[in-house]
Amino acid sequence: MPGYTMQKQQLQTRLRRIEGQVRGVARMIDEDKYCVDVVTQVAAIQAALDKVSLGLLDGHIRGCVRDEIKAGGGEAKVDELLEVMDRVLRR
Amino acid sequence: MPGYTMQKQQLQTRLRRIEGQVRGVARMIDEDKYCVDVVTQVAAIQAALDKVSLGLLDGHIRGCVRDEIKAGGGEAKVDELLEVMDRVLRR
Amino acid sequence: MPGYTMQKQQLQTRLRRIEGQVRGVARMIDEDKYCVDVVTQVAAIQAALDKVSLGLLDGHIRGCVRDEIKAGGGEAKVDELLEVMDRVLRR
Amino acid sequence: MPGYTMQKQQLQTRLRRIEGQVRGVARMIDEDKYCVDVVTQVAAIQAALDKVSLGLLDGHIRGCVRDEIKAGGGEAKVDELLEVMDRVLRR
């Protein structure tokens, strides 16, 4: 069972809101809204997605990573965690 | 008319794809997909949104900012541009 | 003459401070300071470097880019500007 | 003993190189080098600092965080880890 199981509802709520924000940006462009305001809105979506990533990593560390460490291992999990953190950091 | 008018269609296509990717992430969570794979997918959405921001800024610079510079001004537009770039950079 | 000429002094002051901060991080590691505090300090350096980049881009846009736009061109400069903004964004 | 003890030498080498790169940027500005080239160099420093942060977090997770998890706790350490990851992400 993935580590984020307990926060699934919260993550889904956030993603639904983000989906709405993406549609909102499409609408802003459709209505020729001022470019700087559209970019500001895109930055807000990115901040919301950062929170989703951190929420997922939170569950992952407290779930999978912790379980393997407790079982005496976890090296491969930590390698993988650092790799995905690098990917998040560099986008 | 906002500077991005000419690329509107391309931006809309990208945003529709991003909306689909966000729904895809919600589905992955729903199906208990492996957390690291979900985070990787969120990072891909972030990269796609970066391209949308740069596309918008591109149109803005070649449109509004250039027009005001040509008209002998543009100082306030450049101030505003730097501010929004800062917002994009820091999210 | 590069666009940042007028702010050269301010940029140099910031870079000297950043150089000191980098040495400070080396010292923290040398003294086995708590890892999370070291990472926090590195994040502060990153924020300071972001400001240097924005300061440089500010001068560039008000200098080179504006001059070429005023001279009736600037397309290649804007292309180049967007490319470097992409590089800053993705590091 | 902090988790990064074993990689101390490598981190110090990187930080010395970064310090040199910061001085290099100051020199480029002093010599009126082309702004876009200077920004590109600053982006390279930021990428190098990202690696330092990830190196520090690597040691921290394999050290402090793992030790506390093994000892049956670690909740506060994971809270703190997520907080600092957020700080790194947003700069």
Image (cartoon, coloured by chain):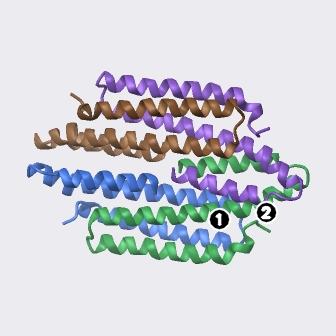
Chain colours: A green, B blue, C brown, D purple
- Tell me the number on the disc at residue A88: none
- Asked whether, in this view, residue B83 is left or right of residue D53, the answer is left
Position of A19 relative to B45 (above/below): below
**C-alpha gap between disc 1 and disc 2:** 12 Å
Q: Residue at x 52, y 66 (%)?
A: A48
Dot 1 alpha-carbon crowd within 10 angstroms: few under 14, some 14 to 19, many 20 or more: some
Q: Residue at x 79, y 63 (%)?
A: A63
Residue D67 locus on image (x, y percent): 84, 48
| Nearer-the-camera pick, D9 or A60 | D9
**Residue indicated by mark 2:** A63
Residue D17 locus on image (x, y percent): 55, 25
Q: Please, what secondary structure does the residue beneath circle 2 have?
A: helix
Residue D74 visible in this rendered orientation of the protein: yes
Q: Please, what secondary structure does the residue beneath circle 1 have?
A: helix
Q: In what quadrant of the picture does the N terminus of chain D appear?
A: top right
Q: Chain of mark 1?
A: A
Q: Are the residues flagged by discs 1 and 2 from a single subunit?
A: yes
Position of A21 relative to C77 (above/below): below
Q: Earlier in the sequence, mark 1 or mark 2?
A: 1
| Nearer-the-camera pick, A11 or B20 | A11
- Asked whether, in this view, residue A80 is left or right of residue D27, the answer is right
Q: Residue at x 63, y 30 (%)?
A: C27
Residue C84 locus on image (x, y percent): 37, 41
Q: Amino acid at mark 2?
A: Gly
**Residue indicated by mark 1:** A55
| Nearer-the-camera pick, C86 or B89 | B89
